[in-house]
Amino acid sequence: MKSMEEMIQAAQKAAETIQTQMNDVQAKLDAIEVEGVAGGGLVKVKCSAKGRILGVDIDESLMKPEEKHMVEDLVTAAFNDARAKADRVSEQEMKNIQGGMGLPPGFELPGMG
């Protein structure tokens, strides 16, 4: 039978392993690029799967003062498209790491919900 001290040490080691894996996943997500598109490609937003904006591309045909509101709407739509793609990638990576840890599906790791 394990002593309480041995069980605490094992739990601490498991927590350290999980933290290391979570850090690795966060770094991986920040390296994965997704692109959101709106207006049939007139506006594109690139971001990391972690949600960091990497760039915005606006077709020069939209660069007219009278198109300002449409451009703003398209940038918003492209950002939301990129964010949705980033969320899907992030969710899949979290499922992969949780499966690798033997955690049950749907189990939320603290701080990762």
Image: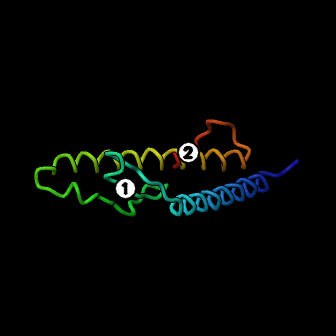
The number of callouts visible is 2
User: Is disc 1 placed on a helix, strand or loop?
Assistant: strand
Q: CA distance from mark 1 to mark 2?
A: 20 Å
Q: Quadrant of residue 26?
A: bottom right
Label 2, residues with CA under 10 Å away: few <14, some 14-19, many ≥20: few
Which residue does the numbered mark 1 point to in the structure image?
45
User: Is disc 2 placed on a helix, strand or loop?
Assistant: helix
| Image point (16%, 47%), residue name | 69
Near-viewer residue (12 or 92): 92
Near-viewer residue (54 or 27): 54
Answer left or right for 34 relative to 14: left
Instruction: Give the colour scheme of this rendering.
Output: rainbow
Question: In the rendered structure, are the residues bearing label 1 and label 2 in contact, judged by CB atoms less than 8 Å apart?
Answer: no
Against 2, residue 105 (above or below) is above
- Specify the amino acid type for callout 2: Glu
Q: Quadrant of residue 55?
A: bottom left
- Specify the amino acid type for callout 1: Val
Numbered label attached to residue 74:
none
Percent of width and height locating residue 17: 69, 59
| Image point (50%, 61%), residue name | 30
Near-viewer residue (109 or 67): 67
Label 1, residues with CA under 10 Å away: few <14, some 14-19, many ≥20: many
Answer left or right for 4 relative to 54: right
Q: Nearer the viewer, mark 1 or mark 2?
A: 1
Percent of width and height locating residue 91: 55, 45
Numbered label attached to residue 91:
2
| Image point (72%, 49%), residue name | 100
| Image point (54%, 58%), residue name | 29
